[in-house]
């Protein structure tokens, strides 16, 4: 009798599994949209932290090399996050887009460091 119950359980998925599979098809597109939104939010958060660190390290502490190093750490973390989110299928495109998105951060850091360097010479 016990053998019949375990044999039936291994062949057919339970009612809850069938219900889950049916419902999963309805909400899978919303799940994908939520993942994309969370990824974009994480990229914006890391970029915002980078801009904050430009001001904190370069303007307040007058440490240019530390500012560039910390910015590079956050840009690399954005790159790693993009590769984890999207995958290795489009590696070249991911790297190119993330580096293109890092240009404004490095330009801001360069503007801050050149302004501070000019003020220190005077």
Image (cartoon, grey):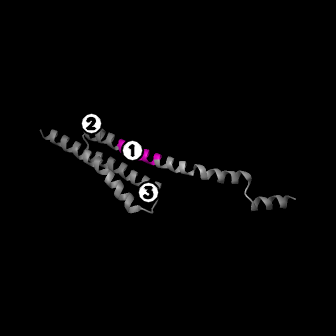
Q: Position of residue 70 (x, y in %)?
A: 33, 47
Q: Position of residue 111 (x, y in %)?
A: 22, 44
Which class describes the residues within 10 Å of circle 3: few (<14), some (14-19), or many (20+)? Answer: some
Whether 19 is among the magenta residues is: no
Q: Residue at x 50, y 46 (%)?
A: 34
Could you say which is closer to the camera, residue 22 or residue 77? 22
The residue positioned farthest toward the top in the image shown: 60
Q: Which residue is mark 1?
A: 44
Q: Give the spatial CA distance, label 2 vs label 3.
A: 33 Å
Q: Which residue is mark 3?
A: 83
Q: Which residue is mark 2?
A: 60
| Residue extent of the magenta highlight | 37-49
With 16 as the anchor, is 92 left or right in this view?
left
* Lower sequence index among marks 3 and 1: 1
Q: Against 78, is 56 above or below?
A: above
Q: Residue at x 26, y 44 (%)?
A: 108
Q: Residue at x 52, y 51 (%)?
A: 32
Q: Against 111, is 81 above or below?
A: below
Which class describes the residues within 10 Å of circle 2: few (<14), some (14-19), or many (20+)? Answer: few
Quarter of the picture holding the C terminus: top left
């Amino acid at each position: 009798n016990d053998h019949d119950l375990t044999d039936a359980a291994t062949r057919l998925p339970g009612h809850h599994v069938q219900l889950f599979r049916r419902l999963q098809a309805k909400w899978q597109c919303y799940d994908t949209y939520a993942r994309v939104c969370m990824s974009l939010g994480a990229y914006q958060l890391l970029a915002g932290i980078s801009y904050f660190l430009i001001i904190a390290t370069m303007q307040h502490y007058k440490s240019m090399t530390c500012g560039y190093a910390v910015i590079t750490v956050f840009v690399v973390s954005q790159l790693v996050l993009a590769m984890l989110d999207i995958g290795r299928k489009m590696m070249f495109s991911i790297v190119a887009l993330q580096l293109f998105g890092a240009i404004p951060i490095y330009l801001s850091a360069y503007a801050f460091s050149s302004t501070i360097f000019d003020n220190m010479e005077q």
